[in-house]
Amino acid sequence: MRKLSAGKLVIASHNQGKVREIRALLAPFGIEPVSAGELGLPEPEETGTTFRENALLKAHASAKGTNLPALADDSGLEVLALGGRPGVYTADWAERQWFEGEKGRDWYMAMGKVEGLLAEQGPDVDRSARFVCTLAIAWPDGEEAVFEGIVDGDLTWPPRGDLGFGYDPMFVAKGYDRTFAEIDPAEKHQVSHRADAFAKLVAGAF
């Protein structure tokens, strides 16, 4: 596959938590990451039904909009007892109508929805879950590459920690007794689903 060279790379995201993590992962490679949000690019509608489809949709939109290579992440939480939900709708579960018609994301509401659905199944419900991350690179000429990472774990309640984002405060990775929101971000970067996908990207694209 085509290799990424030093220079500007668009991170096709408006999610500042994701942008921070991807910047940190790219730091050793001479890449100059700039986010779609910083460039004022519109957020494309995520109409895909898989992480792969949505990641490619976002990467191609940013590559075409800037004439630069673009890296997109589509990731989410899959809960075994909920049939893999919320999955590709992970962010949608956090969507909330605020005052005067404004929308925003309320991750504690989203975590509460997951916990409420688990609680309906009783105290012995299987609490295993996994985070999935699909990274897609797109070039302005249409070439693309995709890499997937996974981290398995279990869900805990109530949420703990304030170092992560999204569903991190309720997710405990296998081998840990702390949530993703309780461990140092540098440590999380070594074991997360995004780190797994990024290791595969590095092997293929650098």
Image (spheres, grey):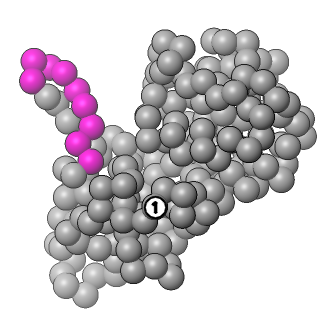
Query: Position of 50 compared to 79: left or right?
Result: right
Query: Position of 60 compared to 186: left or right?
Result: right
Q: Residue at x 54, y 22 (%)?
A: 36
Depth check: 6 or 201 in front? 6
Q: For the C terminus, which image quadrant?
A: top right
Depth check: 200 or 57 in front? 200
The answer to which quarter of the image holds residue 120 is bottom left
Q: Residue at x 69, y 27 (%)?
A: 32
Depth check: 121 or 12 in front? 12
Q: Amino acid at mark 1?
A: Asp
Q: Is residue 9 above or below residue 159?
A: above
User: How many numbered tags mark residues here?
Assistant: 1
Task: Please provide the residue range marked out in magenta.
Answer: 99-107
Task: Let me know if residue 102 is in the magenta part.
Answer: yes
Q: For the N terminus, which image quadrant?
A: top right
Q: Which residue is mark 1?
A: 184
Label 1: few (<14), some or many (≥20) within 10 Å?
A: few
Q: Is residue 37 above or below residue 194?
A: above
Q: Position of residue 148 (x, y in %)?
A: 66, 54
Residue farthest to the left, as pictured: 99
Q: Residue at x 20, y 69 (%)?
A: 158
